[in-house]
Image (cartoon, grey):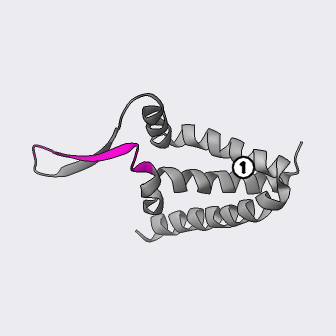
Amino acid sequence: MIAWIDFLLLFLASFRLTRLLVYDKITAFIRRPFHREAEETLPDGSTIAYIEIKGGGLQKWIGELLSCYWCTGIWTSAFLYGIYVYMPDLASPLILILAIAGCAAIVESIIEKLIF
């Protein structure tokens, strides 16, 4: 069993890494080979954007994975826990940086909801 503080850091790091891969613009280049952005014009003239999964086989599987927050979260959690256990010298700074960024993202979301 791991200490509660390690669990908390892994939780926050997994949250941040998952959001980074699934939603953030800075990692769009990772999703681009697997997703196609499309737009649909609604009857009222407004448009909505959505993604279409590209290809088949492994390409489609990765595309589906990167479009699913919960699915990607399982894999990022497994990855972070794996390096935490087997490569602690590499994992410690990565997990700490992601956890700090995760806290900042949560605080920013709360402040944004309070202000707007």
Mark 1 falls on what kind of element? helix
Q: Residue at x 30, y 45 (%)?
A: 50
Residue 102 vs 62, above or below: the answer is below
Query: From which residue to which does the magenta span run?
Result: 31-44
Name the residue tied to disc 1.
80
Residues packed near mark 1 inside 10 Å, few (<14), some (14 to 19) or many (20 plus): many
Residue 107 vs 61, above or below: the answer is below
Q: Residue at x 48, y 39 (%)?
A: 68
Q: Is residue 86 magenta?
A: no
Residue 112 location in percent, x, y? 47, 68
Q: For this rendering, which residue is in front, 45 or 26?
A: 26
Residue 110 location in percent, x, y? 53, 64
Q: Looking at this view, name the residue that lies furthest to the top.
A: 57
Residue 72 location in percent, x, y? 56, 42
Apparent side of residue 28 relative to residue 98 in the rendered image (left or right): left
Residue 3 vs 98, above or below: the answer is above
Residue 70 vs 100, above or below: the answer is above
Apparent side of residue 46 relative to residue 15 in the rendered image (left or right): left
Tell me the quarter of the picture where residue 88 sits.
bottom right
Residue 40 location in percent, x, y? 19, 44
